Amino acid sequence: MPPYVTTAPSIRAVSHGSCCQRRAARSYQTRSRWFGHGCAPQGRETRDQIVAGLSFGFWSGLLGVKYEQLWRDCLHHAFPNSSGRRKQVASALEGVRKFRNRLAHHDSMLNLDVPFEIRRIIEVAGYIDHDAEKWLTHISAAMETYAERPIASSDTVVVAARSAWPLYQKCHAYVCQAGRTFRAIERIAFYTDSVIQTDVPLVRHRRDGVDWSADSALSLSGSQDSNDRKIASVIETSRALGWTEGVYQVFLLSHQGDPQHRSLPSPIRHQGVGRGSAFTQRQRYVSLHALETAATTADL
């Protein structure tokens, strides 16, 4: 453990240290103004007070790009069961932070895939310790609570798919920006060229924060996990189509021939005209039943 954590220096002394130490000092001082300093005289804060006073954002911020060298030197040891790639761990932890903030501020969960967010929390715990991952899985009542929610009939998301539809046709996946939120859905439909296409694939696997680089594809292609290998193939295919490096979110989908795949009798045409009249410019939720019975988007 770094010595500035274990030696419990004065917060004033910490503030004159490294960039990381200065961030800790600022975070602690801000929270101290909100909640008070406890029993210790100012300038004599204990290590436990300092650590407890740091915000979630401080810890997730330690995995930012400007701390790449700190990650290589020591921070990667805090996540021994991860891939070892800072970007992947940072993206997962940032997702946990955003979900935590939505809960803490009583934000709406209606447009959020709650099971996915819960799985991500447990996944991050597993990066740190497999026993912690198993313990959280065992004691968590989150999914039992979620199962008691009123069930919406909108089980399919229709996405604007000018670039995504050609990619799906080649590798049976949907790729979008990292961190984009979705409701809990079972299927994806593709809206492009003013029609909803006939394929309505089942979502097989969802993963956020995927590093879209040749090195990442190479690493994933050698994995024992079949989803890793499929994502590697998606990265390679998309890059051949001109997709750029970055961090993306991936949905692995079913395809024709799969017994759980669904195909509409014909494309569903959108009859709106003019600027801003598209059926969706981002995403829109419908039921599979409505898609299967609609003649035009006016029926949805």
Image (tube, helix red, strand yellow):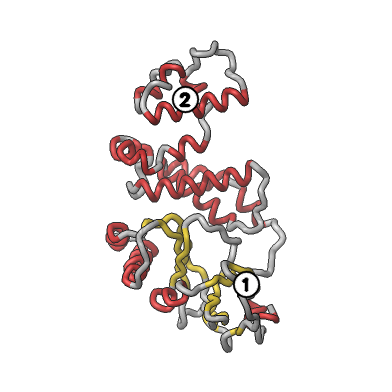
Q: Position of residue 99 (x, y in %)?
A: 57, 48
Q: Which mark is residue 276?
A: 1
Amino acid bearing label 2: Ala
Q: Secondary structure at mark 1?
A: loop
Q: Residue at left 47%, top 76%?
A: 165
> Is residue 5 among what the camera can see?
yes
Q: Nearer the viewer, residue 74 or 259?
A: 74
Residue under label 2: 25
Q: Position of residue 128 (x, y in %)?
A: 41, 41
Q: Secondary structure at mark 2?
A: helix
Q: Nearer the viewer, residue 128 or 19?
A: 19
Residues packed near mark 1 inside 10 Å, few (<14), some (14 to 19) or many (20 plus): few
Does 58 sit above or below residue 36?
A: below
* Disc nearer the start of the sequence (1/2): 2
Q: Quadrant of the N terminus?
A: top left
Residues packed near mark 2 inside 10 Å, few (<14), some (14 to 19) or many (20 plus): many
Q: Position of residue 27 (x, y in %)?
A: 51, 29
| Image quadrant in which you'd find residue 196 | bottom right
Amino acid bearing label 1: Gly
**Real-space Cα separation, disc 1 to disc 2, in angstroms:** 48 Å
Q: Quadrant of the C terminus?
A: bottom right
Does 48 sit above or below residue 292?
A: above
Q: Residue at left 51%, top 52%?
A: 119
